[in-house]
């Protein structure tokens, strides 16, 4: 979509006072959740006519204030911005960073640069869409065109596939069938050169140092890091992905989620590269990428699902205050269920958790402890380096049974899950050192130890018995 009238652009209005100063060929490229140079449609479009560009990132306090700026993600973001700046400098450019209301800052930078157009990718959350509307109106008032490109970081845009009678798919399987048949554009290369006009201050890049409360094992961010990891993972692990993706100790999933969240890698490129590699692993991996797009098209159609039940089951959840001790035990990884505790400790240490861990810890909080899913999703968002509104809130709703799962009342049994997905107990021993001397299966059920063996293990008893937790949940849901 192109908005605005070029003839009334800011550059032209300057022409009246000083024709020498007319600058009609500068574009601002606004980077949001697409912090990369490869496969970046707004960047490519802006550079098309040999224009000068202002690559801009705005740190908006409104986003920070909404609780999305937590230490782990701020650190990863700092890495991404440094790497983006370095990549632009190698090509003759640089990154401009501003801090403030995004709409105001983009207008200000466009004015400083004498730019007559702004390029950006659209996004799906309610906040992002309202912001885009405000930006369009403000730029229009200044006579600057806003060009909005592909949805940021999806392979298939929300709304591109939809069932006849609805604006989105509520069930993944038919969605995936349609998704798979969509033509996918070819990924774009990174630009060779970038020219940035003089006279626009760079601002200062945020840095990792000085950030308190970081997870010790936090991954490094940035496009260079993401591309290196992608290449290595496709070469070494993709082939074992289908069989191994649920094996907690094996840890063969791509760990590319933070790169997808910050857009240091493009989904379109990932789908292409996985398909080119081929095989059952690639099929399974591409299917997971489709899950990402699936949740985004749900959120685009139902922005309120970020905070409210997508499908209510009339739950009267226990609040954090009502279940304080249980919630604390869950957060700190001392519920007495080793597999739950291992996963929660991985989250705290790495700012990341294996998908199987996310499923079973979410089921444990929302169902076995019957605590409001928002308490858990908030805690995940506080720590996850890939913490993402669409993926986090809708996966939480999936596990709480208020989302798109067609079996909303199933409860994952942490002992059965542990025996299946951590059969020899290696994952538990890695994250719960108190249990390092135990073998499977007792490492998953230490309460079964007796006498001196039990006394030798400094590990809590379960916060709730599984049958009691199940009874409470069934009663609450009216399941008899
Ligand atoms: P891989 O298995 O290598 O998958 C590749 C990519 O596919 C992932 O990077 C991710 O982008 C996407 N993907 C995989 N599984 C899912 C899924 N179930 N839903 C949507 N996309 C998926 N993912 C996030 O990116 N951010 C979150 O905040 C988030 N919160 C979650 C909360 C809960 C309760 C649950 C059950 C899942 C959550 N997920 C979230 C989805 C999933 O757990 C992670 O994407 C995955 O574990 C990331 O690891 P990976 O990159 O190694 O995944």
Image: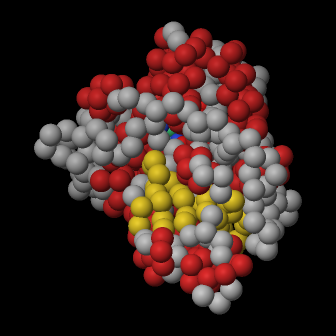
Please give the name of the residue rendered at 55% of the width and 50% of the height, measured from the top-left corner: 45
Please give the name of the residue rendered at 71% of the width and 79% of the height, measured from the top-left corner: 20
Foreground residue among 398 and 106: 106
Type of colouring: secondary structure
Q: Is residue 28 above or below residue 215?
A: below
Please give the name of the residue rendered at 54% of the width and 59% of the height, measured from the top-left corner: 119
- Residue 12 in view, yes or no: yes
Residue at the far right in the pictured view: 209
The picture places residue 28, in percent across and down from the top left corner, at 62, 64
Left/right of residue 98 with respect to residue 182 in the rendered view: right
Left/right of residue 332 with respect to residue 75 in the rendered view: left
Left/right of residue 110 with respect to residue 420 in the rendered view: right
Which image quarter holds the N terminus?
Answer: bottom left
- Residue 138 in view, yes or no: no
Foreground residue among 2 and 79: 2
The picture places residue 111, in percent across and down from the top left corner, at 63, 78
């Amino acid at each position: 979509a192109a908005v605005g009238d070029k003839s009334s652009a800011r550059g032209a209005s300057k022409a009246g006072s000083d024709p020498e100063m007319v600058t009609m060929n500068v574009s601002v490229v606004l980077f949001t959740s697409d912090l990369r140079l490869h496969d970046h449609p707004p960047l490519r479009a802006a550079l098309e006519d040999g224009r000068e560009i202002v690559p801009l990132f705005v740190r908006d306090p409104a986003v920070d204030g909404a609780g999305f700026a937590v230490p782990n993600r701020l650190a990863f973001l700092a890495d991404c911005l440094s790497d983006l700046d370095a990549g632009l400098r190698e090509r003759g450019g640089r990154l401009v960073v501003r801090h403030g209301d995004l709409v105001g800052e983009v207008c200000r930078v466009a004015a400083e640069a004498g730019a007559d157009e702004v390029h950006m990718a659209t996004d799906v959350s309610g906040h992002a869409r309202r912001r885009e509307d405000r930006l369009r109106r403000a730029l229009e008032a200044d006579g600057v065109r806003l060009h909005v490109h592909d949805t940021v970081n999806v392979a298939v845009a929300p709304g591109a596939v939809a069932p006849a009678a609805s604006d989105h798919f509520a069930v993944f399987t038919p969605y995936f069938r349609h998704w798979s048949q969509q033509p996918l554009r070819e990924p774009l290369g990174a630009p060779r050169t970038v020219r940035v006009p003089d006279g626009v201050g760079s601002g200062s890049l945020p840095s990792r140092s000085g950030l308190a409360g970081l997870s010790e094992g936090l991954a490094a961010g940035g496009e260079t890091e993401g591309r290196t990891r992608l290449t290595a993972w496709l070469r070494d692990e993709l082939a074992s992905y289908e069989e191994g993706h649920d094996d907690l100790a094996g840890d063969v999933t791509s760990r590319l989620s933070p790169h997808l969240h910050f857009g240091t890698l493009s989904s379109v490129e990932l789908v292409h590269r996985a398909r080119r590699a081929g095989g059952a692993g690639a099929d399974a991996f591409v299917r997971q990428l489709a899950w990402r797009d699936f949740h985004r098209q749900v959120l685009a159609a139902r922005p309120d699902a970020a905070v409210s039940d997508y499908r209510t089951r009339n739950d009267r959840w226990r609040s954090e205050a009502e279940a304080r001790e249980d919630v604390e035990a869950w957060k700190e990884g001392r519920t007495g269920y080793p597999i739950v505790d291992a996963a929660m400790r991985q989250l705290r240490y790495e700012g990341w958790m294996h998908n199987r861990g996310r499923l079973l810890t979410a089921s444990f909080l929302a169902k076995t402890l019957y605590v409001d899913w928002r308490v858990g999703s908030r805690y995940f968002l506080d720590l996850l380096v890939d913490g993402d509104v669409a993926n986090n809130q809708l996966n939480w709703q999936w596990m709480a049974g208020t989302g798109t799962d067609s079996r909303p009342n199933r409860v994952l049994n942490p002992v059965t899950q542990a025996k299946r997905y951590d059969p020899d107990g290696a994952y538990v021993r890695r994250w719960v050192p108190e249990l390092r001397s135990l073998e499977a299966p007792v490492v998953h059920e230490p309460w079964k130890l007796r006498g001196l063996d039990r006394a030798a293990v400094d590990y809590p008893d379960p916060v709730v018995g599984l049958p009691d937790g199940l009874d409470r949940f069934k009663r609450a849901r009216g399941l008899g």
